Image (cartoon, rainbow, N blue to C red):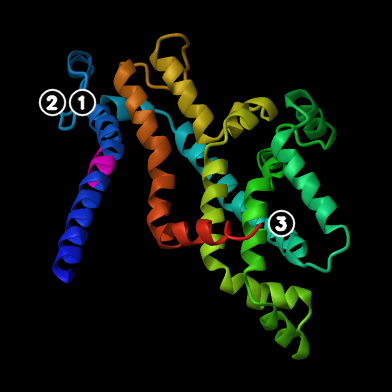
Amino acid sequence: MIEDRTLNGRIFATVNYLLLSIIALLTVLPFMHVVAGSFTTSAELAVKRFILIPTEWSFEAYRFIFSTNTIFKAMGVSVGVTFFGTLFSMLITSLMAYGLARRDLDGRKYIMFLVVFTMLFSGGLIPSFLVVKEMGLIDSYLALIIPSTISAFNLIILKNFFQNIPEGLEESAKIDGCNDFGILFRIVLPLSMPAIATLSLFYAVTYWNTYLSAILYLNDSAKWPIQVLLRQIVVLASGLEYSPDLDASVPPPEQTVKMAVIVVATLPILCVYPFLQKHFAKGAMLGSIKG
């Protein structure tokens, strides 16, 4: 019987490894195709539908993208917005989540109802624009941060995570003379690093991919983040517009530029993931155990 169970276990593990390997390949191969396509020539990309290793290497797409110094400024804008936006969002989300995790908070259920309500209904695009305009945030980097400060989904996950922390730890801290802020920053947050890392990644991806907010609230093209500028470069590569900022001597290879734009837009935020990956699954799952 033991040998049968061992044999069944090996078969089950083998099938699991096989299926997971296939899923991993289906996930990785498209990105490898995009990376390879960005380093090949437009002629080869037009002939071959799928490329993993270019026959003829070419850097024309990246020469076209980086032919202007504007892209480095746009990259700096995106890095700044992502860093400060993530920091501010996690601070506000942690403060609100900790308050809602306290079972003795008056009106806790009504506040949670309002939070969940925003996940189902929103004011819409025009009211959001009017609010940002009345706050005087037009053409300000704060317009990319403040409207996206709190995600209701992230708030609920972090609140549920805080509720999993034993109440005895907070009571012991109060006996030692710790106030609510001390309990949050000295006890609760250090114990919640998996959730903090996971939600920080969620917020960072959101801020890094900022596009619509920049289009709506930033009239000055010099303040555009990287996503808006890359979209403009794709339009220019398609021959629909002309920009004096780009080097006219560099021909715009349309298809390879699209591939290169995806790489440039994805690679920076992708480099952050390995540092948070060990906390990712644990943080997301523990925060969803209790409602």
The residue range painted magenta reads 21-25
51 part of magenta stretch: no
Of residues 32 and 251, the one drawn nearer to the viewer in this rendering:
32
Q: Secondary structure at mark 1?
A: loop
Precedes in sequence: disc 2 or disc 3: 2
- Residue assigned mark 2: 56
- Residue assigned mark 3: 92
* Residue type highlighted by circle 2: Glu
The answer to whether any part of residue 54 appears in the image is yes
**x, y percentage for residue 148?**
67, 42
* Residue type highlighted by circle 3: Ile
In the picture, residue 162 is in which quadrant?
Answer: bottom right
Report the disc number at residue 275.
none
Compared to 82, does 128 lie above or below? Answer: above
- Residue assigned mark 1: 40
Main SS, magenta region, reads helix
Residue at mark 2 to residue at mark 3: CA–CA distance? 51 Å
Query: Are the two marked residues, 2 and 1, in contact with CB atoms closer than 8 angstroms?
Result: yes
Residue at mark 1 to residue at mark 3: CA–CA distance? 45 Å
**x, y percentage for residue 83?**
56, 52
The answer to whether any part of residue 151 appears in the image is no
In the picture, residue 131 is in which quadrant?
Answer: top right
Residue at mark 2 to residue at mark 1: CA–CA distance? 6 Å
Compared to 59, does 44 lie above or below? Answer: above
For the residues carrying marks 2 and 3, which lies nearer the camera in this image?
A: 3
